[in-house]
Image (cartoon, rainbow, N blue to C red):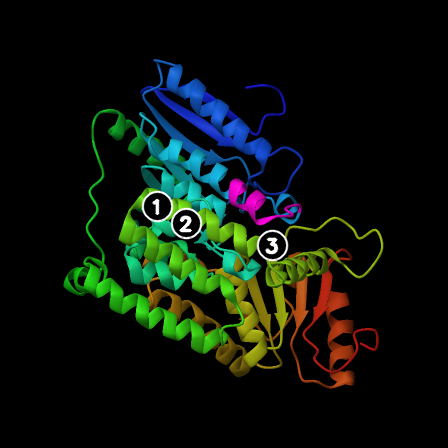
Amino acid sequence: MAPGAALTWELVDGGVAVVTFDLKGEPVNKISRAVKQDVQATFEALEQDASVKAIAFFSGKPDTFIAGADIEEFVGLTTAAEAARLSAEGQELLERVARFPKPVAVGIHGACLGGGLEFALACRYRVASDHPRTQLGLPEVQLGILPGAGGCQRLPRLIGTRAALDMILAGKVERAQKAFRIGIVDELVPHAILRDITLAAARRMAGGWRPRRRRPGGFLGWLLDGNPLGRRLVFRAARKQVLAQTRGNYPAPLAGLEAVEHGLRHGLAAGLKREAELFGQLAVTDVSRKLVQIFFATTALKKDFGIPDPPPPATVHRLGVVGAGFMGSGIAGTAIVQAGVDVRMKDADLPRVAKGLAAARDILDDRLKRRRITKYEYARLVALLSGSDRYAGFGRAELVIEAVFEELQVKQQVLREVEAATHEDTVFASNTSTIPIHRI
């Protein structure tokens, strides 16, 4: 590909073209007009190359697959016709991917949202990593619009009407484990073998294998999702629920409902056309503009460190938590689950430490019980948790969080102790809720 192109590819054993999407100069991959042109050019080249038998598609970003569409382009739309045309262009591109003569397998790690999920739905086979950062969803209604690149058509056909409406109408984002259970992804694997498993699926499809998918939900799924009468009941109940929650003041969920219903009644082509029309109408509403403003404001706040010229973020491998009560144990358990860091807890005496360790372990127990992690992952994560009534082990911590009683003198004493026990570069953070940090 040309220098600076978002998509590059290489041919590996078995005639599989490994395509990597890495938007240069951006922290995440997002879909813009330039990216669409790049995708089209790449797939044209892949189709014409006789040595390519199948495609395996990956992101070049460490923690993001595709975050969605480029919102900056979206806000530049001034008319419903412009917005509808933008939607139709995206649909045409993904329809080309869906009808591509060579099978496409996609390996998903990190956020796969909006247009990113719509792209994945157009591919023939989907493999996702089981990492906590891997999340899939269609959050467009949170911007006052609907999934406009075929999401309202392909998702219900894949996982059933009820499950699709649950995601589309609320803008839900699901973890990879649930996405696997409801049928969005075909395989769920550890991140370390995501590439290998995706390549293997592409090779199998190149050899003529086709994935078989059962309709989710069994007999009840067939009764409510698989026939027009059942779907009519589902749509009626969904409309009633949306009106009860929005009081008719929020048009996007109702439009999403209409797009899904229209497509299932009149076919994919008619559904895509109606989806684009509704997207165009929603994109220029005052509701959508205000929600986009909120989105940009929220994003800006996340980037505001509160000080000029902040230092670069440091990677945390070891966390110290002072205070093994309700908040301290919650912080410890969440840090292990979400970030996989080594956590050392400290409190005034060992019985308190033991109680805190048990509470933190309860968070892991809950995830194991709900099948969010395997028993092997559970054993690995539990081993990251330890505690003491002394500061032993705090010397190597990059971050220490205090969660002791809300008393100024106690917190100041903890800070003095932490300073004496840790490295000079260690970051000290407080869980204070009422005492200003500068007083501590």
- In the rendering, at what x and y percent does residue 178 appear? 35, 58
Residue 328 located left or right of residue 106: right
Q: Which residues are magenta?
A: 76-86
> Of all residues shown, which one is farthest toward the left?
219
- In the rendering, at what x and y percent does residue 243 appear? 44, 74
| Quadrant of the frame with the N terminus | top right
Residue 54, by quadrant, is top left
- Give the labeled residue for mark 2: 274
Q: Earlier in the sequence, mark 3 or mark 1?
A: 1
- Name the amino acid type tagged 3: Val
Q: Earlier in the sequence, mark 3 or mark 2?
A: 2
Q: Are marks 3 and 2 in contact (CB under 8 Å)?
A: no
> Of all residues shown, which one is farthest toward the top?
50
- Name the amino acid type tagged 1: Ala
Tell me if I can see residue 147 in this picture.
no
- Give the labeled residue for mark 1: 270
Residue 27, by quadrant, is top right
Marks 3 and 2 sit apart, C-alpha to C-alpha, by 16 Å
- Give the labeled residue for mark 3: 284
| Quadrant of the frame with the C terminus | bottom right
Marks 1 and 2 sit apart, C-alpha to C-alpha, by 6 Å
- In the rendering, at what x and y percent does residue 80 appear? 57, 49
Viewer-nearest residue: 52 or 438: 52
